[in-house]
Image: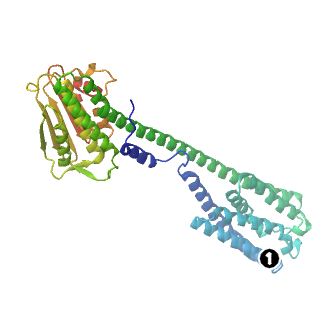
Amino acid sequence: MTTAPSPRTTERGERLRSALPTTSEPRAALSARRINVALARATAFFGLVFVVQTVPVMLQQLPELIAPWSYIVGATVFGALIAVAVSAWVNRAHRLVFGFFAIVYLVAVLVWPLTVGDPADFAENTPWIWYLVTVATTNAAIAFRLPVAILYTILTPLAYGIIRVSPAGGDVGFTRASLDTVYAILLSSAALIIFTSLRQAAEAVDDAQAGALAKYAEAVRQHATDVERVQVDAIVHDSVLTTLLSAANADRPEQKVLAARMARTALKHLEVAAAPPVDDERDVPLDRLARRIRSSASEFSTPFVIRATHVASRGVPVQAAEALYSASVQAMVNSMQHAGGAATLVRRRLTVTGLADGCRITVSDTGRGFDAAGIPQERLGIRVSIIERMLSVGGTARIESSPGAGTTVTLQWPADTEADALAAETDPDRASVEPSGAGA
């Protein structure tokens, strides 16, 4: 027999899943973006350093150049470099602006012969545009994809060397032009290799981060599914199996009356599960929780002595209240079914105690007790409906019982880790028995 999850349980699971990162939408790559920003700003900074070095040379060579072409080329190149510095400073449009400067510089190299009045004047002097070739190739490394950046790194110095060999570029000779070209290519290639290595390392870090986040999200989603399964299993046990077992074993009239009351209680639980979800952000007052437990206890044929202390003006979250209530009811059902003995010989008590930041509920009886270590794992009464239910909301459930000495179930939210550690230290045997659970 199967039972569908309640709308409240399903919504809680979906709400937890929706808050998690998904594997199809990884978090934005932080490392690669930061590396790109750092490289762009470093390139812009060194570009300005080269500008300081180049401007005096350009001013010295202006009388030897043809106006207005020399002024247009100079203004365009240096204007593009200023745009590069601004883009790096404000961290906007790196690829567009850096790529624009790389193209402007290549065009300036190609039209350089048009700006020279007498090429013989540059047979011994180095044109001012030469000092910016490395700046242009590093800008290309920032702006373009790797194949295009490699092509630019080779072609731009090569174009400069060809022009310098030609009569219009000064006719400096093959050796000098080759040295300038090879030097520019080697220096630009080193910068390109460094940029590419840093980017690849950053992308590897981002991939590892995305993989770790995906695994974490999957693990937490699996945890949410397991928590929901515990809640559904508890509903099935509390609302269906317990009632069916009681009805099947009801031979005496009082047992049949008890089975009928349990059936009505199960129907109430199903009605609550089908109700619209409550606001999980609000706390449930402890006095209301105590009244609800008292109302459920009144349905049993044998009364429980119920006491509530320090419950005024205190509350617990909705999920914790639901777990405390359901686990308390299950503990009372277990007592009714398994404590044994006549009603006058078995005393049953339930105490609700408000704590500074939570609640403790104790359900005890003086019945026959049981050996907790000997209960089969397939029995769900304590393992699922009490222990796992409390653990799923951050609480604890402690079961103390031995044959002939009665049973005490202590429920607490939030978990009392100090008390659990003290119990394990002072009584290792009891601490080892309690987590295994027992019951119907």
Residue drawn at 72 percent across, 52 percent down: 146
Q: Position of residue 286 (x, y in %)?
A: 19, 47
Image quarter of residue 10: top left
Q: Is residue 185 above or below residue 232?
A: below
| Residue type, label 1 | Ser
In the displayed image of the protein, which residue is found farthest to the front? 253
Q: Position of residue 405 (x, y in %)?
A: 14, 22
At numbered mark 1, what does the secondary structure look like: helix, strand or loop? helix
Q: Identify the image quadrant of the N terminus.
A: top left
Residue drawn at 83 percent across, 70 percent down: 112
**In the rendered view, does 7 fall on the left or right side of 431?**
right
Residue 244 visible? The answer is: yes
**In the rendered view, does 373 fall on the left or right side of 402?**
right
Callout 1 crowding tier (Cα within 10 Å): few <14, some 14–19, many ≥20: many
**In the rendered view, does 317 fall on the left or right side of 305?**
right
Q: Position of residue 319 (x, y in %)?
A: 30, 45
Residue drawn at 64 percent across, 61 percent down: 43
Q: Identify the image quadrant of the C terminus.
A: top left
Q: Position of residue 279 (x, y in %)?
A: 32, 52
Q: Is residue 156 above or below residue 61?
A: above
Q: Is residue 74 above or below residue 181?
A: below
Q: Which residue is mark 1?
A: 70
Between residues 210 and 317, which one lies in front from this camera angle? 317
Q: Is residue 301 above or below residue 118?
A: above
In the displayed image of the protein, which residue is found farthest to the left? 344
